Each structure stands twice: as structure tokens, then as C-alpha cells.
Amino acid sequence: MLTDRRSFTEHDRDMTSRNVLHFPEYEAKLETARMKSREAEGVITGEAEIDGHPVCIFSMDANFMMGSMGSVVGEKITRLFEYATARHLPVIGVTVSGGARMQEGMLSLMQMSKVSAAVKRHGKAGNLYIVLLTDPTTGGVDASFAMQGDITLAEPGARVGFAGPRVIEKSLNQALPKDFQRAERVLSCGFIDAIVQRSEQRAVLAKLLKLHERTAR
Amino acid sequence: MEDYEVVLNARGEGRLTANDYITRLVPDFIEFHGDRLYGDDSAVVAGIGTLLNMPVTVIGIEKGKTTEERIRHNFGSAHPEGYRKALRLMKQAEKFRRPVLCLVDTAGAFCGIDAEEHGQGRAIAENLLEMADLKTPILSVVLGEGGSGGALALSHSDRIWMMEDAYFSVVSPESCANILWKTTEKAKDAAEVLCLTAAKLQNLGLIDRICPKDDIKKLGTDIRSEFELLLEMPVNDLLEQRYRKFRRVGY
């Protein structure tokens, strides 16, 4: 939807999760997620063009175990950043996630560190990273690569936050403000650059990419 | 000891907290306050001093012991201001090429309205990003609780060590059981499968050393010699090694 017709080439399509920790019921959950999402894992990565501008792009999938980040999600995104760094390509990241994937324990938590290090290298080399936050982007993804973009866009009304609202409500024993963790509120708190309607996203991305085009020196 | 007992024990009273370690490891410690942006978070105790004659920056998450102390330190759950103070002092350490010692002991980053609206996620994300490129050695020791992202935010380090009776987990066993099996009574089973003890994490290759408890003197000499080793490395090699350390996690 965001990319030019027929321009998308997927990376690492066949990479699938293994139950390294022998976590109960994990295989069955993965199977259900594959059926539901019709994808092999919780993120699609690859390269494409947006209005003729070459980009690397990843898009997380809410239908795959709530967009949770396990080792494969972390690995695919890390590889994408490394690929983009080597070729001086911008990265567009469309996030949606409930956080780290419990079934992979600390291996999933440390994906936050792994991806962050790759984001840092990509940025240090002068490359552009644009994040598009969609509903909901929470937990370990919010606390890592969703909040590391040069430019941070969000969909209207998207929930963006670290802790789940029920957790906060329970621990504070008080009702939360109505717009709490909604993109509009998060923007007024200072953490989002702009809120962009779905119908406008492609045009806005194209404009931002054009503004960052590398000119011959 | 069963894994869930390790968790309960790590939360228990009568344990040494970050301040105890700081007092013994860095007797001339001088505390610095504030993130220079908004406030000062007492859950994070940070400053400089000498560890066996070596100038170091120390950043610890302090839980407190008495009720009064616990309230003052917010039970060891940091706000974004705490992570930003930590990052400020890490950048200062980088400037003077002082090694950074992080003492991690937290159930997790604080969950609250203010914490969210001041950017808890962004604060942790920024630490991960900047620590990946900090041009001075970083060593983290998990003293008791390594609670998820709030602990990870001080653990993007060249070396991650754990006390033998500490734990480090993506989620608390209670929350895990509640989400997966709709009951916190299965926390014991959750603790078992989450692989959160020092021994299991070392087997997975996620931590570098298990430190015997009750021997702070040895801990001090071990940290000191590790820092010497890391300081000898050319900065580019140090950063490359740090990148590789996290690059190989999982898959």
C-alpha cells in the first residue's frame, strides 16, 4: 500500500521461529499465527520504491502473535538495517506490537539491544530512518526501534506506550485519562513528529524521501 | 532451589542493595543528581569515584531497605528521568574515558501516567541506542532483579555479569502466567520455562559471568581487571566486539 506497484522484493521470507526454550504450547501458537496471518513470521522485510525512491521497508503484523518480537523478528529487522547501511538506503519501519515475545524469554528481550545497535550503525552512516507507528505499538518495541527514528509518524488514534494500560490502571488503582497513550496525546507530550492519515501516508513518505535524496557531490 | 524461589528470594528483604555495593566497591563515591532536562529520579543512584584506584562512573538502581528508603527510591523502579540521568553520566564518562559500572536491581521500569507521558519507552530506547556506541567500557552486574526493559536499559554492555542468585527475565513469572494461563498461581511453572536464572542464561550464552554472592571484595578485583582489559582495547575494537555480542543473540 505504501510502495510503488510491483516494486517490492521480500527479504528472508522463509525464516521461521524455533522453540529454543521448549516453551509449552509455543509451536501450536506459531502454527495458529501462521494460519491467521498467512505469513511465516511477525514482520515482513524487504526493499521497494516509494514514488521512485528506493527504500528498505519493514512492516510488523498484528495478526502474528500480537506483533510480538521474537528472535526471528529481531533478526529480520537487524538484517534489513545492515543491508540498508551497506547500500546507503533509507529504512521505513511500520510498527505494531504488543512487545517482546514471552515464549522466547531473554532471547526475545535482547532483540531490543540487537536491533538498536543496527539502527545506531545505520544512523551513524548518515542514513534516514522513518518510523510509522500504528495501533498499538507498545512494550519492548516502543522501548527500542519504534522510538529511534529520525522522523516519527503515527496513525491517528494509535496507542503508543511502554506499559499496557491495564497494568497501569491496576497498579495505580485509578482510571486513566481518555486520550492516554493515544498518538494525539503522545504528540502533545513531544514524542511524535506528525500524525498522518492512512490515505496521506504514501505522499508524505514520498515527500520526506525526496527531501533526503542524496545529491551528487 | 527452584527457579521461582530464586525470583522470590531476589525480591526478598535483607539483601544487599546497590548502595551497599557502591559503599564497598567505591568508598569515595560522590553522587551526582539530575537529568538536566526535567528532574532527579532517586531510583537511580549515579556518580563517580575510584574502584581500587581506578576512576569509574557508577550507575545503580537502588531499592532501599527501610519503608522510608523504599518510598524514596520508588522501590527501585525508575522513571524516564532516571534513565536519562544514567545516559547523561555515561556520556560524561565517555568524555573522560572512564569505565562505566552499572548495578542493576529492578522489578522493572516504573509504570505510571507521568512515566508514560515523559517518554518511558523513548528513554529506554535512547539508552540502548547510545550505549551501542559509547566509546568507553561498560560492565553491568545484575545484583538481584533484572526486570525486563527497565533492567535492559542499563545492560547494553561489554560484559553482563549476574550474582549467582539473581534473575533476569523478559517478563515477571506472575504476569507471564496470567497472560498465558489466566492465573498467577502458575507463576512457578512460568519461572521454570522463562529460563531466567544466572546459570540458565549463561548456558544460553546471554551473560558472561556468574559472581559468587557474599564476596564483594572478589567482585571488586574482578571488575577492576576486566576494566583494565577493556581499556587496553582500541575503541573501534571495543565497539565492534560490543556489536557482535548482541548481534549473535537468538537466531
Image: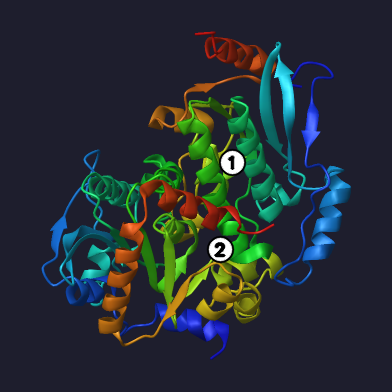
Percent of width and height locating residue B94? 27, 47
Instruction: Report the residue marked by disc 1.
Output: A137
Q: Does dot 2 land on a helix, a strand or a loop?
A: loop
Percent of width and height locating residue B248? 61, 57
Amino acid under disc 1: Thr
Are tags 1 and 2 found on a single chain? no
| Near-viewer residue (A117 or A157) | A117
Q: Does dot 1 land on a helix, a strand or a loop?
A: strand
Residue at 60% over, 51% down = A99
Position of A176 with respect to B97 (left or right) is: right
Percent of width and height locating residue B86? 29, 52
The chain identifier of the residue carrying mark 2 reads B
The quarter holding residue B163 reads bottom left
Amino acid under disc 2: Val
The chain identifier of the residue carrying mark 1 reads A
Mark 1 surroundings within 10 Å by alpha-carbon count, few (fewer than 14), some (14 through 19), many (20 or more): many
Compared to residue A5, the image places residue B99 above or below, namely below
